[in-house]
Amino acid sequence: MSFINYSSREINCKIVYYGPGLCGKTTNLQYVYKKTNPDQKGKLISLATETERTLFFDFLPLALGDIKGFKVRFHLYTVPGQVFYAASRKLILKGVDGVVFVADSQIERMEANMESLDDLKINLAEQGYELEKLPYTIQFNKRDLPNVAPVENMNKLLNPRNVPCFDGCAVTGIGVFETLKNVAKQVLIELKKHY
Amino acid sequence: MSGSDLIMYEEEFKKIDEELQKLYLQTNAKVVFLVDKNGQLIASAGETQDIDTTSLASLTAGNIAATGGIARLLGEKEFSILFHEGEKDNIHISLIGQRVILVVIFDKRSSLGLVRLRVKKSSEALVGIFGDITSKSEKEKVEGRLDESPFAEISDEDIDNLFR
Protein backbone atom coordinates (compact mmCIF):
# COMPACT_ATOMS: atom_id res chain seq x y z
CA MET A 1 0.00 0.00 0.00
CA SER A 2 1.76 3.09 -1.14
CA PHE A 3 1.14 6.43 0.49
CA ILE A 4 0.72 9.33 -1.91
CA ASN A 5 0.74 12.73 -0.30
CA TYR A 6 -0.39 15.51 -2.63
CA SER A 7 0.18 18.06 0.07
CA SER A 8 3.85 17.39 0.74
CA ARG A 9 4.27 15.93 -2.75
CA GLU A 10 5.68 12.61 -1.63
CA ILE A 11 5.24 9.00 -2.62
CA ASN A 12 6.14 6.35 -0.08
CA CYS A 13 6.40 2.69 -1.00
CA LYS A 14 7.20 -0.40 1.04
CA ILE A 15 9.51 -3.16 -0.14
CA VAL A 16 9.97 -6.33 1.89
CA TYR A 17 12.97 -8.66 1.69
CA TYR A 18 11.86 -12.22 2.37
CA GLY A 19 13.77 -15.50 2.54
CA PRO A 20 14.96 -18.31 4.81
CA GLY A 21 17.10 -17.73 7.90
CA LEU A 22 20.67 -16.57 7.22
CA CYS A 23 20.08 -16.08 3.49
CA GLY A 24 21.37 -12.50 3.61
CA LYS A 25 18.31 -10.23 3.81
CA THR A 26 19.83 -8.02 6.49
CA THR A 27 23.17 -8.06 4.63
CA ASN A 28 21.38 -6.69 1.54
CA LEU A 29 20.04 -3.77 3.56
CA GLN A 30 23.37 -3.17 5.25
CA TYR A 31 25.07 -2.94 1.86
CA VAL A 32 22.44 -0.53 0.53
CA TYR A 33 22.90 1.54 3.67
CA LYS A 34 26.67 1.56 3.35
CA LYS A 35 26.63 2.64 -0.28
CA THR A 36 23.93 5.30 -0.22
CA ASN A 37 24.61 9.03 0.18
CA PRO A 38 23.87 10.26 3.72
CA ASP A 39 21.28 12.73 2.41
CA GLN A 40 19.35 9.93 0.73
CA LYS A 41 18.98 7.60 3.66
CA GLY A 42 17.64 7.48 7.19
CA LYS A 43 18.85 5.31 10.01
CA LEU A 44 19.12 1.56 9.51
CA ILE A 45 17.07 0.10 12.32
CA SER A 46 17.69 -3.53 13.26
CA LEU A 47 15.57 -5.28 15.82
CA ALA A 48 17.89 -8.21 16.35
CA THR A 49 18.90 -10.66 19.06
CA GLU A 50 22.26 -10.51 20.80
CA THR A 51 23.64 -12.87 18.19
CA GLU A 52 22.53 -10.50 15.42
CA ARG A 53 19.69 -12.66 14.22
CA THR A 54 16.73 -10.55 13.13
CA LEU A 55 14.06 -10.70 15.80
CA PHE A 56 11.33 -8.56 14.31
CA PHE A 57 12.53 -6.55 11.33
CA ASP A 58 15.20 -4.31 9.85
CA PHE A 59 14.11 -1.01 8.42
CA LEU A 60 15.86 1.38 6.05
CA PRO A 61 14.19 4.48 4.58
CA LEU A 62 15.61 5.60 1.24
CA ALA A 63 14.86 8.79 -0.67
CA LEU A 64 15.66 8.21 -4.30
CA GLY A 65 14.85 11.51 -5.92
CA ASP A 66 11.96 13.16 -7.74
CA ILE A 67 9.49 12.06 -10.35
CA LYS A 68 7.27 14.75 -11.80
CA GLY A 69 7.91 16.90 -8.73
CA PHE A 70 7.07 14.13 -6.28
CA LYS A 71 9.70 12.92 -3.82
CA VAL A 72 10.00 9.16 -4.16
CA ARG A 73 10.74 7.28 -0.96
CA PHE A 74 11.18 3.59 -0.46
CA HIS A 75 10.96 1.93 2.91
CA LEU A 76 12.94 -1.30 2.90
CA TYR A 77 12.06 -3.97 5.43
CA THR A 78 13.39 -7.45 6.11
CA VAL A 79 11.49 -10.20 7.89
CA PRO A 80 13.00 -12.51 10.51
CA GLY A 81 13.92 -15.63 8.53
CA GLN A 82 13.93 -18.21 11.28
CA VAL A 83 10.98 -20.59 11.18
CA PHE A 84 9.79 -19.94 14.73
CA TYR A 85 9.31 -16.22 14.10
CA ALA A 86 6.40 -16.97 11.79
CA ALA A 87 3.94 -14.79 13.70
CA SER A 88 6.17 -11.71 13.45
CA ARG A 89 7.07 -12.38 9.84
CA LYS A 90 3.45 -12.17 8.80
CA LEU A 91 3.06 -8.69 10.30
CA ILE A 92 5.83 -7.14 8.23
CA LEU A 93 4.03 -7.97 4.99
CA LYS A 94 1.18 -5.66 5.86
CA GLY A 95 0.90 -2.94 3.23
CA VAL A 96 3.71 -4.29 1.07
CA ASP A 97 4.19 -2.82 -2.44
CA GLY A 98 6.98 -5.05 -3.66
CA VAL A 99 8.74 -8.23 -2.57
CA VAL A 100 12.33 -9.37 -2.93
CA PHE A 101 12.90 -13.05 -2.29
CA VAL A 102 16.49 -13.68 -1.25
CA ALA A 103 17.36 -17.33 -1.85
CA ASP A 104 20.40 -19.01 -0.34
CA SER A 105 22.30 -20.66 -3.19
CA GLN A 106 23.91 -23.37 -1.07
CA ILE A 107 22.66 -26.83 -2.07
CA GLU A 108 21.79 -27.77 1.50
CA ARG A 109 19.51 -24.71 1.82
CA MET A 110 17.25 -25.52 -1.15
CA GLU A 111 14.60 -27.06 1.05
CA ALA A 112 14.68 -24.01 3.35
CA ASN A 113 14.30 -21.77 0.28
CA MET A 114 11.24 -23.66 -0.90
CA GLU A 115 9.71 -23.70 2.55
CA SER A 116 10.22 -19.96 2.87
CA LEU A 117 8.69 -19.30 -0.55
CA ASP A 118 5.60 -21.32 0.39
CA ASP A 119 5.45 -19.44 3.67
CA LEU A 120 5.61 -16.16 1.75
CA LYS A 121 2.68 -17.12 -0.46
CA ILE A 122 0.59 -18.24 2.51
CA ASN A 123 1.33 -15.09 4.51
CA LEU A 124 0.60 -12.83 1.56
CA ALA A 125 -2.69 -14.61 0.99
CA GLU A 126 -3.61 -13.98 4.62
CA GLN A 127 -3.19 -10.26 3.99
CA GLY A 128 -5.22 -10.49 0.81
CA TYR A 129 -2.33 -10.38 -1.66
CA GLU A 130 -1.18 -12.73 -4.40
CA LEU A 131 2.50 -12.99 -5.14
CA GLU A 132 1.65 -13.26 -8.83
CA LYS A 133 0.13 -9.79 -8.79
CA LEU A 134 2.82 -8.02 -6.79
CA PRO A 135 6.07 -6.48 -8.04
CA TYR A 136 8.47 -9.32 -7.32
CA THR A 137 12.20 -9.90 -7.79
CA ILE A 138 14.36 -12.86 -6.81
CA GLN A 139 18.01 -12.81 -5.77
CA PHE A 140 20.13 -15.96 -5.73
CA ASN A 141 22.51 -14.93 -2.99
CA LYS A 142 25.86 -16.34 -1.89
CA ARG A 143 26.97 -17.24 -5.43
CA ASP A 144 30.56 -16.89 -4.22
CA LEU A 145 30.37 -19.98 -2.02
CA PRO A 146 31.78 -23.29 -3.28
CA ASN A 147 28.77 -25.52 -2.66
CA VAL A 148 26.12 -23.66 -4.66
CA ALA A 149 23.32 -25.16 -6.72
CA PRO A 150 23.34 -24.39 -10.48
CA VAL A 151 21.24 -21.36 -11.40
CA GLU A 152 19.10 -23.45 -13.82
CA ASN A 153 18.11 -25.78 -11.00
CA MET A 154 17.28 -22.92 -8.68
CA ASN A 155 15.23 -21.26 -11.40
CA LYS A 156 13.25 -24.43 -11.87
CA LEU A 157 12.59 -24.80 -8.17
CA LEU A 158 12.06 -21.21 -7.10
CA ASN A 159 11.23 -19.24 -10.20
CA PRO A 160 8.78 -21.16 -12.37
CA ARG A 161 7.19 -17.92 -13.62
CA ASN A 162 10.55 -16.59 -14.70
CA VAL A 163 10.33 -13.27 -12.84
CA PRO A 164 13.38 -10.98 -12.81
CA CYS A 165 16.19 -12.74 -11.01
CA PHE A 166 19.72 -11.69 -10.08
CA ASP A 167 22.82 -13.51 -8.89
CA GLY A 168 24.11 -11.98 -5.72
CA CYS A 169 26.83 -11.86 -3.17
CA ALA A 170 25.35 -9.45 -0.66
CA VAL A 171 28.48 -9.31 1.50
CA THR A 172 30.48 -7.74 -1.33
CA GLY A 173 27.47 -6.03 -2.88
CA ILE A 174 27.16 -8.01 -6.09
CA GLY A 175 23.55 -7.94 -7.30
CA VAL A 176 22.30 -5.89 -4.34
CA PHE A 177 21.48 -2.67 -6.19
CA GLU A 178 20.42 -4.52 -9.34
CA THR A 179 17.83 -6.36 -7.25
CA LEU A 180 16.62 -3.22 -5.50
CA LYS A 181 16.40 -1.19 -8.69
CA ASN A 182 14.46 -3.89 -10.41
CA VAL A 183 11.82 -4.24 -7.73
CA ALA A 184 11.58 -0.46 -7.23
CA LYS A 185 11.01 -0.01 -10.94
CA GLN A 186 8.26 -2.61 -10.93
CA VAL A 187 6.60 -0.85 -7.98
CA LEU A 188 6.60 2.49 -9.82
CA ILE A 189 5.27 0.93 -13.01
CA GLU A 190 2.50 -0.63 -10.94
CA LEU A 191 1.68 2.80 -9.48
CA LYS A 192 1.55 4.22 -12.97
CA LYS A 193 -1.02 1.60 -13.95
CA HIS A 194 -3.33 2.55 -11.12
CA TYR A 195 -3.13 6.34 -11.07
CA MET B 1 -2.31 -2.89 -4.08
CA SER B 2 -4.66 -0.39 -5.62
CA GLY B 3 -7.52 -1.04 -3.23
CA SER B 4 -5.99 0.30 -0.08
CA ASP B 5 -3.49 2.93 -1.13
CA LEU B 6 -3.62 5.99 1.06
CA ILE B 7 -3.88 9.21 -0.90
CA MET B 8 -3.62 12.47 0.98
CA TYR B 9 -5.00 15.66 -0.51
CA GLU B 10 -4.06 19.21 0.42
CA GLU B 11 -7.41 20.03 2.02
CA GLU B 12 -7.54 17.02 4.33
CA PHE B 13 -3.87 17.28 5.13
CA LYS B 14 -4.45 20.80 6.42
CA LYS B 15 -7.30 19.61 8.60
CA ILE B 16 -5.19 16.80 10.02
CA ASP B 17 -2.35 19.18 10.65
CA GLU B 18 -4.64 21.58 12.49
CA GLU B 19 -6.07 18.77 14.59
CA LEU B 20 -2.58 17.61 15.58
CA GLN B 21 -1.50 21.17 16.43
CA LYS B 22 -4.58 21.51 18.62
CA LEU B 23 -3.89 18.23 20.37
CA TYR B 24 -0.25 19.21 20.86
CA LEU B 25 -1.21 22.44 22.56
CA GLN B 26 -4.08 21.03 24.60
CA THR B 27 -2.07 18.13 26.00
CA ASN B 28 1.07 20.13 26.64
CA ALA B 29 2.91 17.33 24.86
CA LYS B 30 6.41 17.28 23.42
CA VAL B 31 5.49 15.70 20.13
CA VAL B 32 2.33 14.47 18.51
CA PHE B 33 2.34 12.47 15.32
CA LEU B 34 0.18 10.38 13.08
CA VAL B 35 1.37 7.24 11.33
CA ASP B 36 -0.43 4.88 9.02
CA LYS B 37 -0.59 1.25 10.08
CA ASN B 38 2.13 0.32 7.60
CA GLY B 39 4.64 2.63 9.22
CA GLN B 40 4.48 5.72 7.00
CA LEU B 41 4.53 9.03 8.80
CA ILE B 42 1.49 11.12 7.85
CA ALA B 43 1.87 14.30 9.88
CA SER B 44 3.42 15.61 13.07
CA ALA B 45 3.34 18.54 15.48
CA GLY B 46 5.65 19.80 18.20
CA GLU B 47 9.34 19.42 18.90
CA THR B 48 10.13 17.07 16.06
CA GLN B 49 13.52 18.49 15.07
CA ASP B 50 15.52 16.29 17.46
CA ILE B 51 13.54 13.15 16.75
CA ASP B 52 14.00 10.66 13.94
CA THR B 53 10.31 10.61 13.07
CA THR B 54 10.69 8.20 10.15
CA SER B 55 12.21 5.51 12.36
CA LEU B 56 9.76 6.28 15.12
CA ALA B 57 6.87 5.86 12.70
CA SER B 58 8.07 2.49 11.48
CA LEU B 59 8.75 1.19 14.99
CA THR B 60 5.40 2.42 16.28
CA ALA B 61 3.62 0.60 13.48
CA GLY B 62 5.65 -2.52 14.29
CA ASN B 63 4.63 -2.14 17.90
CA ILE B 64 0.94 -1.85 17.02
CA ALA B 65 1.22 -4.79 14.64
CA ALA B 66 2.87 -6.99 17.28
CA THR B 67 0.29 -5.99 19.88
CA GLY B 68 -2.47 -6.72 17.39
CA GLY B 69 -0.95 -10.16 16.88
CA ILE B 70 -1.03 -10.77 20.63
CA ALA B 71 -4.63 -9.56 20.78
CA ARG B 72 -5.74 -12.02 18.14
CA LEU B 73 -3.97 -14.88 19.92
CA LEU B 74 -5.94 -14.01 23.03
CA GLY B 75 -9.21 -13.71 21.15
CA GLU B 76 -9.35 -9.92 21.47
CA LYS B 77 -10.11 -7.81 18.42
CA GLU B 78 -7.33 -5.37 19.21
CA PHE B 79 -5.67 -3.44 22.00
CA SER B 80 -6.43 0.05 20.88
CA ILE B 81 -4.24 1.89 23.39
CA LEU B 82 -0.61 1.31 24.32
CA PHE B 83 1.21 3.29 26.94
CA HIS B 84 4.92 3.20 27.68
CA GLU B 85 6.26 4.94 30.73
CA GLY B 86 9.86 6.12 30.83
CA GLU B 87 11.96 7.96 33.40
CA LYS B 88 11.42 11.30 31.73
CA ASP B 89 9.24 10.79 28.70
CA ASN B 90 6.13 8.74 28.19
CA ILE B 91 4.49 7.64 25.01
CA HIS B 92 0.80 7.14 24.39
CA ILE B 93 -0.13 5.20 21.25
CA SER B 94 -3.68 4.72 20.06
CA LEU B 95 -5.22 3.08 17.08
CA ILE B 96 -7.75 5.23 15.24
CA GLY B 97 -10.45 3.87 13.01
CA GLN B 98 -8.49 0.68 12.29
CA ARG B 99 -6.29 2.62 9.95
CA VAL B 100 -3.98 5.15 11.53
CA ILE B 101 -1.97 5.41 14.72
CA LEU B 102 -1.89 8.52 16.87
CA VAL B 103 1.23 8.94 19.00
CA VAL B 104 1.69 11.45 21.81
CA ILE B 105 5.04 11.84 23.53
CA PHE B 106 4.87 13.79 26.76
CA ASP B 107 6.78 14.46 29.96
CA LYS B 108 5.87 15.66 33.45
CA ARG B 109 4.43 18.91 32.09
CA SER B 110 1.42 16.82 31.11
CA SER B 111 -0.35 13.78 32.53
CA LEU B 112 -1.70 10.48 31.29
CA GLY B 113 -5.24 11.47 32.23
CA LEU B 114 -5.09 14.67 30.21
CA VAL B 115 -3.53 12.91 27.22
CA ARG B 116 -6.15 10.16 27.25
CA LEU B 117 -8.99 12.65 27.42
CA ARG B 118 -7.72 14.86 24.61
CA VAL B 119 -6.67 11.94 22.43
CA LYS B 120 -10.22 10.61 22.66
CA LYS B 121 -11.63 13.90 21.41
CA SER B 122 -9.09 14.23 18.61
CA SER B 123 -9.66 10.64 17.55
CA GLU B 124 -13.28 11.37 16.77
CA ALA B 125 -12.30 14.32 14.61
CA LEU B 126 -9.58 12.32 12.85
CA VAL B 127 -11.91 9.42 12.11
CA GLY B 128 -14.15 11.91 10.34
CA ILE B 129 -11.31 13.35 8.27
CA PHE B 130 -10.07 9.92 7.22
CA GLY B 131 -13.60 8.97 6.27
CA ASP B 132 -13.60 11.97 3.93
CA ILE B 133 -10.26 10.95 2.46
CA THR B 134 -11.48 7.45 1.73
CA SER B 135 -14.66 8.58 0.04
CA LYS B 136 -12.79 11.24 -1.91
CA SER B 137 -10.18 8.84 -3.27
CA GLU B 138 -12.84 6.28 -4.13
CA LYS B 139 -14.79 8.91 -6.00
CA GLU B 140 -11.72 10.02 -7.89
CA LYS B 141 -10.87 6.46 -8.75
CA VAL B 142 -14.27 6.08 -10.39
CA GLU B 143 -14.27 9.44 -12.11
CA GLY B 144 -10.58 9.45 -12.94
CA ARG B 145 -8.08 12.08 -12.04
CA LEU B 146 -5.82 11.63 -15.00
CA ASP B 147 -5.26 15.30 -15.64
CA GLU B 148 -3.64 15.79 -12.24
CA SER B 149 -2.06 12.41 -11.69
CA PRO B 150 1.71 12.61 -11.40
CA PHE B 151 2.00 9.02 -12.58
CA ALA B 152 0.03 8.98 -15.78
CA GLU B 153 2.95 10.31 -17.74
CA ILE B 154 5.83 8.67 -15.94
CA SER B 155 8.29 7.42 -18.49
CA ASP B 156 10.83 4.63 -18.20
CA GLU B 157 13.41 7.34 -18.37
CA ASP B 158 12.01 9.08 -15.28
CA ILE B 159 12.28 5.84 -13.39
CA ASP B 160 15.79 5.12 -14.61
CA ASN B 161 16.85 8.63 -13.62
CA LEU B 162 16.06 7.87 -10.00
CA PHE B 163 18.87 5.35 -9.93
CA ARG B 164 21.62 7.40 -11.46
Image: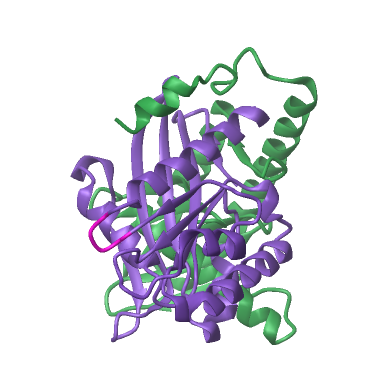
- Let me know if residue A171 is in the magenta part: yes
Query: What residue is shown at x 44% (from left), y 60% (from top)?
Result: A140
Q: How many marks?
A: 0
Residue A36: x and y in percent read 23, 46
Query: What residue is shown at x 36% (from left), y 50% (from top)?
Result: A61
Residue interval drawn in magenta: A169-173
Q: Which quadrant would the N terminus of chain B be assigned to in this image?
A: top right
Chain B's colour is: green
Query: What residue is shown at x 44% (from left), y 44% (from top)?
Result: B21
Q: Is residue A18 left or right of residue B148?
A: left
- Let me know if residue A123 is in the magenta part: no
Q: Which quadrant would the C terminus of chain B be assigned to in this image?
A: top left
**B153 vs B104, nearest the viewer:** B153
Q: Is residue A173 left or right of residue A25?
A: left
Q: Is residue B29 visible?
A: no
Q: Is residue A168 left or right of residue A118?
A: left
**B121 vs A59, nearest the viewer:** A59
Question: Which residue is outermost to the top?
Answer: B147
Chain coloured purple in this rendering: A
Residue B11: x and y in percent read 58, 27
Q: Main secondary structure of the magenta part?
A: loop
Vertical side of B17 occupied by B27: above or below: below
Task: Quadrant for residue A66, please give it.
Answer: top left
